[in-house]
Image (cartoon, rainbow, N blue to C red):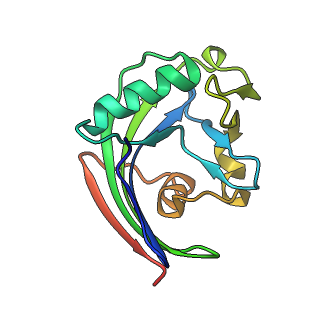
Amino acid sequence: MTITMIDEDSRFGCRSGAIIFNEDKTKILLENQDNGRYMFPGGRIDVLEDSNTAITRELEEELNLKIDLKLKYILEMFLNLPKKKYHEIGFYYLANIDEKKVTNKTKSLDGDGIFEWISIEKLKDYKILAKPLKDIICKKIENDGLEHIVYREY
């Protein structure tokens, strides 16, 4: 059972995601949700599951990947979606992998989306739900340590 709450005009969720760079950090792996929106690989955290276990499970389920991950961002987003207000708490982990481990246009093993390597130079042109992380990656901001980000559209 995932950590998600829905009522008439709002939704809350807890997510764990991975910001996966290729070896030379010129590309990033994103999941195309087939609706013009892209997401970092990952998914919902289950009740009684920690964020590291969740992202490890998600990467194995979606891409058959077992990689070293480092928690980098805790992102609280308050978004105005077309039909509801959305509040999400996300835990985002960093990783670098050999680009050949995931070929471009790889279908998710669980059938939810298609993974693509996107050039960091072109990332600004993509609609990504976790917009603050996209902005940080586009600006190539590299800070040590864990960062807490609060992003509000309402």
Look at the image and tell me whether residue 40 can be seen: yes
Q: Residue at x 68, y 30 (%)?
A: 111
The reply, left or right, for residue 91 in relation to residue 83 is left
Residue 145 on image: x %, y %: 23, 46
**Front position in the image: 123 or 43:** 43
- Is residue 23 in view? no
Q: Nearer the viewer, residue 74 or 61?
A: 61
The image shows residue 33 at horizontal and vertical percentages of 69, 46
Question: Whole-percent x and y of residue 83?
Answer: 61, 76
Q: Is residue 83 left or right of residue 71?
A: right
Which is more toward the observer, 99 or 75? Answer: 75
Quarter-wise, where is residue 138 in the image?
Answer: bottom right
Q: Is residue 35 above or below residue 27?
A: below
* Identity of the residue furthest to the bottom in this view: 154
Image position of 70 with respect to 103: above or below = below
Q: Which residue is located at x 67 percent, y 52 percent? A: 123
Q: Position of residue 143 (x, y in %)?
A: 32, 50
147 lies above or below 28 = below
Q: Residue at x 72, y 51 (%)?
A: 122
Up/down of 81 relative to 52, above or below:
below
Please report the residue visible at 61 percent of the width from the left and 57 percent of the height from the top.
Answer: 128
Quadrant occupied by the N terminus? top left
